[in-house]
Amino acid sequence: MLRKWFKDEEGQGMVEYGLIIGLIAIVVIVALVALGPKIRDMFNEVNDQIDAIGSDGTTAPTTPAGT
């Protein structure tokens, strides 16, 4: 009976899937932490450009980023 219990691999697949999902979650979190500020800056720049568009559809003069 004890040998049969040690050879039972019924839950092994679920554990492997759980580990894979856990590793994917860690990679996604690390990527978001690393790229988050860059993505935020891109969205802020687009938002600033949209805000700069006047009601008549013309754009106000803006200076390039970093100058």
Image (spheres, rainbow, N blue to C red):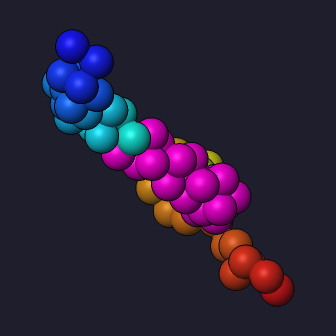
Count of numbered circles on the image? 0
Q: Main secondary structure of the magenta part?
A: helix
Quarter assignment of residue 39: bottom right
Between residues 14 and 65, which one lies in front from this camera angle? 14
Look at the image and give the residue range highlighted in magenta: 20-43
The quadrant of the image that shows the N terminus is: top left
Q: Position of residue 19 (x, y in %)?
A: 39, 41
Farthest-out residue, right: 67
Q: Position of residue 59 (x, y in %)?
A: 55, 65
Farthest-out residue, top: 1
Between residues 57 and 33, which one lies in front from this camera angle? 33
Relative height, residue 12 to residue 28 (above, below): above
Q: Residue at x 24, y 25 (%)?
A: 3
Between residues 36 and 55, which one lies in front from this camera angle? 36
Quarter assignment of residue 46: bottom right
**Viewer can see residue 61:** yes
The quadrant of the image that shows the C terminus is: bottom right
Q: Residue at x 35, y 45 (%)?
A: 20
Q: Residue at x 28, y 18 (%)?
A: 2
**Viewer can see residue 21:** no
